[in-house]
Image: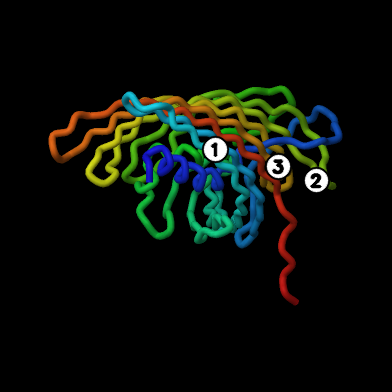
Amino acid sequence: MPLYAAIDVRRLALLLLGPALAAGALTACDKESVHVGFRPAAGTSYRYEIKVQSVTTTVLGDDAPDRSVDEVTLESQDTVMSAVPGEVKVQVVLRRAGSPDRVFQVRFDRGAQLAGVDAVDGLPPAVLGPVGFPEFLPAAATAPPDRSLSPGEKWKIDATPGVPGAPGARLEGTGRLVKVTTSGGRKVASIKADTRLPLSSTTKLGDTTVTITGTETTVSTATRALADGVVQEATSLTKGVYNLVLAPQAGGAASVTGTMSVEIRSQTRRLPDEAKPA
């Protein structure tokens, strides 16, 4: 599989974990202060449909640009494993037609900020690496601070979720509570965030060491239910530009340099809860 394809597929799969978020057509409410904390009950389960489009352009050495476009519809089942003061553990099952399910375990703080990754299909979290791991972060980018907020209020985003065995990825930017509204009978908060994430990664693909450095930016918006802080609808646009260095380990071949640009759009909507058997 070409390098660009391997990276792109990996990012698409991980994007499912991060429904990075948006608002629908809503009815305005009074400009009141609200607390948009993440307060789900243990055992609660949520279903989402995520539509993802990614465009990746890779240039290696003197080769012509290689452009790939992928569109996919995915479904996630998020189940709250435990919820205690300060931390919520969630198991996420990702489903894509024709592919095996992917299972992740992640931890969030009470503001819905991603705190860490505990397991990826039973493998150590380090297998994600800093290139795949940041796709979790857009979901946390719109996580509000754990305090009351008024419409129009802004806050600073500065987060470094912990992943054992993987370098820290520092997410910086600003968030803003746009408005408080009602949608589908639920009172919701609409949030927008602009974030920037520098990346640096060195991995092995066969006999070649691949080094990737660059920066990605994300614009995301979300509506979260005020009752429990759970995302109702979401969209995000992530753009990244990276420098590549491919260094063969055998045969004394010279290293190959190149670039990779990525643009990923996602739309997420919460699906009705599945009916429980009588």
Asked if residue 178 shows in the view, the reply is yes
Residue found at x 23% / y 29%: 255
Sort mark 3 into few (<14), some (14-19) or many (20+) by Cα contacts within 10 Å: many
| Left or right for 217, reference 167 | right
Frontmost of labels 3 and 1 is 1
- Check the image and report above or below for 263 versus 98: above
Which part of the image, by quadrant, shows the C terminus?
bottom right
Q: Which mark is residue 233?
A: 3
Is 23 or 251 nearer to us in this picture?
A: 251
The residue labelled by disc 1 is 69
Is disc 1 placed on a helix, strand or loop? Answer: strand
The type of residue carrying mark 1 is: Val
Residue under label 2:
186
Q: Nearer the viewer, mark 1 or mark 2?
A: 1
Residue 253 is situated, as x and y percent measured from the top left of the image, at 17, 33
Q: Amino acid at mark 2?
A: Arg
Q: Residue at x 31, y 44 (%)?
A: 165
Q: Residues within 10 Å of mark 1 (few under 14, many from 20)?
A: few
**Separation of disc 1 and disc 2 at Cα?**
36 Å
Q: Nearer the viewer, residue 11 or 113?
A: 11
**How far apart are the alpha carbons under marks 3 and 1?**
24 Å
Residue 159 appears at what percent x and percent y? 47, 32
Secondary structure under badge 2? strand
Q: Secondary structure at mark 3?
A: strand
Q: Earlier in the sequence, mark 3 or mark 1?
A: 1
Label 2, residues with CA under 10 Å away: few <14, some 14-19, many ≥20: few
Image location (x, y in percent) of residue 52: 60, 42
Mark count = 3
Question: Type of residue at label 3?
Answer: Glu
Height in image: 95 above or below 7?
below
Who comes first in sequence, dot 3 or dot 2?
2
